[in-house]
Amino acid sequence: MDNRRVMPEELQLRIHGDASLPTLIYFPGMHGDWTLVSRFRKQLLGKVRFVEFTYPRTLEWSLDDYAANIEIALAQNNITTGWLLGESFSSQIVWPLVARGNFQAQGIILAGGFVKHPFCCFIRLTRKIFGLSALSLLVWTMYGFTKSVRRCFRLFRKSRPKTDEFAERRTKLDSQAAVHRLHLIAESDPRATARATNLPIFYISGFIDPIVPWLFVQSWLKKNCPSLRATKIVSLADHNILGTGTEKAAAQILTWMNA
């Protein structure tokens, strides 16, 4: 297993698996790190080369800055092609990465991801009326939702070590970085890129997802994206589909990649 890291003071990268395997590049959700993807990664062991990131707790980067720095990190590790797995917030990084045209993506998989968030106006309105403190509360509500649903599905004990690491990383600066990412979501509109891309697009979501309601996302993709190949809604899974619907999500994504 190759665990080289790139720019540890800014963007961290880890590689699991041999270069001869198909490459799956994981872009984390709002939390911005690899602490919730360990069970999913284990499901793919020996089947893909799994590349994962932890983002810096930046309050300044734009979505294009994220994409540009990721391009650099991939190039420094001789990763020139692969599948893009955009989880939640990071779907908004996948689109500018594709639009830049420098990385040879083989396909796009949205895991609880989206094109333009169906409720981005709510984020802007919340910030305008209540300020940053309200957005910070919204972030912590999202984190709390993820942990509570894990308990309901009796997955908490299995993922306890990484869940503890997840909690330890939720500092004040981390909260501020997450609020900044919410602002990026509110201002992002990659619909033109999604409509124009020729890359195969796949969408997977948990059925219990009030954070990014799958009904709106799936409907828009089917109406507007000619390159959409398939969608999958997993019952008894939540917004963190890779964590609460791990086995089904891993099997489905492997099927899409191999097809």
Image (tube, rainbow, N blue to C red):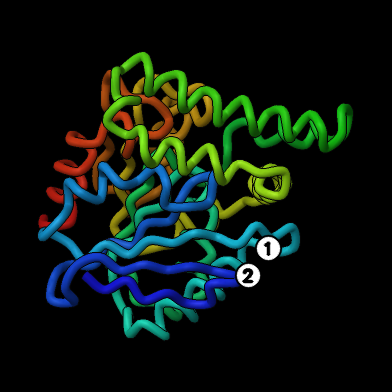
- The 10 Å Cα crowd at callout 2, few under 14, some 14 to 19, many 20 or more, is some
Where disc 2 sits, the SS reads helix
Could you say which disc has been placed on residue 206 in the image? none
Distance from disc 2 to disc 1, alpha carbons, whole Å, reads 5 Å
Where disc 1 sits, the SS reads loop
Contact between labelled residues 1 and 2, with CB atoms less than 8 Å apart: yes
Say whether residue 256 is visible.
yes
Q: What is the x, y in percent for residue 39?
A: 26, 42
Image quarter (top left, top right, bottom left or bottom right) of the C terminus: bottom left
Q: Is residue 246 left or right of residue 26?
A: left
The residue that label 1 is drawn on is 62
Q: What is the x, y in percent for residue 116?
A: 57, 43
Image quarter (top left, top right, bottom left or bottom right) of the N terminus: bottom left
The residue that label 2 is drawn on is 65
When the figure is inspected, residue 167 is found, relative to residue 169, above or below; the finding is above
Q: Quadrant of residue 129?
A: top right
